Image (cartoon, rainbow, N blue to C red):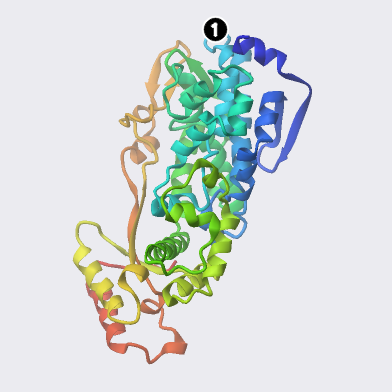
Amino acid sequence: MCVQTFEKSDRLANEKVFKDPVHDYVHVRHQLILDLIDTREVQRLRRIKQLGTSQFTFHGAEHSRFSHSLGVYELTRRIVDMFERNYPNDWDPSMRLVTLCAALLHDVGHGPFSHTFEKIFETDHEAITTDIILSEETEVNAVLKRVSLDFPNQVASVITKEHSNPQVIQLISSQIDADRMDYLQRDAFFTGATYGAFDLSRILRVIRPYKDGIAFQYQGLHAVEDYIVSRFQMYMQVYFHPASRGMEVTLDRLLYRAKQLYHEGKLFPIFPLLDPFFKEEASLDDYLKLDDGVLQTAIILWTDSDDAFLSELSSMFLNRKPLKSVTFEKGKDEEIVEILRDIVGKLSYDKELYTLTNSSSDLPYDYKLKSKTPIQLMHSDGTLVEISTVSAIVKSLSGILHGDHRLFVPKEFLERDKANINMFQDEYDAFQHYIKNGAITHPKD
């Protein structure tokens, strides 16, 4: 049975819907999609928060990767429906199912506090996403194989950007795709950051397929500009917020310490579900047992650790007492950064555990990126123009990395704790001297 024939036979007699706070309703018209949603691998995403440590800064940011995945699916479904309705000569309807499945599954490999966990335990959520789709041991794979034995490979090829149809790839992964459109709107909604909102309905109206990918009708220029500016603002104000990064760094250091203690045979208690990761021999099944609750439970247990450093770092994370930061100029202030780290290390703090540099940067848009196709606007005669050549706003943001570099240290070095007013006066004065007389600054979080 060909994919298109399967797609028609797979249609539900009665459409199913999920009520969504961002998109109103998520419409499911295929049994295949409904069955994918019900797999254990997709349901696991309910237990993983979308914004990781940002929940400690924006208390409303409690939404999950599951809701985001449904949102990406819904936006993709709307776009595909419109393509089939308005551009039948430019869109291949046989691409419908593979596009919808890839949209739903694009983040299925994410783990708890994804990027921090990945750094410490050397995992890769994109590679794991592909493994989940292709492994014969997963429910996702079994559902996809109902279409054809090769269908999991087709879906995986969209994730790895190797699919033969560039339109399908660009709908899921490009500089303006269903993934980004959903997370910007969803994250803005739940954090309360209204500058993350943009005219989604207009973008969905002007998006269109063409031979080499996806374009936008020229009259939609301002809506696309709005999207790019909103993305820039969300990264600067939400994703790179110093308090969220402070919590991320604190988590990084406590996991680093736990890993140290494990290899020294001193980690107690050892949380069974994390044991395979400390041993560096975790299977896919081990990974699929992980969620935010597993990691947080381990951290709760470690607050009673005999190791003072692990116990304190765990308590700092659980009780939202993150390391604080000073900004520095990369390529100029490294010597001062090391002096500051040494000052911290002279006291009862471990230099490696209580100081860490963190750099966050984002490229709002770049027409030169080989990994991401440029945003094309289409005139009524079918000719294309790259957006930065006709938009001063986009041109001003294009090709420029935005972000900063920070040194994270215990808060006592930046905020004199009244309870410890007599503590390490000389070291505190020295730390403040280098901040005031060097190029390093310390804006409030």
Q: In this image, 432 relative to 275: left or right?
A: left
Q: Quadrant of the C terminus?
A: bottom left
Q: Position of residue 421 (x, y in %)?
A: 41, 90
User: Which residue shows up at 42% across the image and 88% down it?
Assistant: 420
Count of labels shown? 1
* Mark 1 secondary-structure assignment: loop
Q: Quadrant of the N terminus?
A: top right
Please tell me how crowded label 1 is: few (under 14), some (14-19), or many (20+) other residues with Cα within 10 Å: few
Q: Position of residue 30 (x, y in %)?
A: 70, 23
Q: Which residue is mark 1?
A: 89
Q: Position of residue 226 (x, y in %)?
A: 49, 38
**Residue flagged by tag 1: what amino acid is it?**
Asn
User: Which residue shows up at 39% across the image and 48% down it?
Assistant: 122
Q: Quadrant of residue 149?
A: top right
Q: Residue 20 or 292: which is nearer the viewer? A: 292
Q: Position of residue 131 (x, y in %)?
A: 49, 34
Q: Residue 179 or 125: which is nearer the viewer? A: 125
User: Which residue shows up at 54% across the image and 13% down it?
Assistant: 91
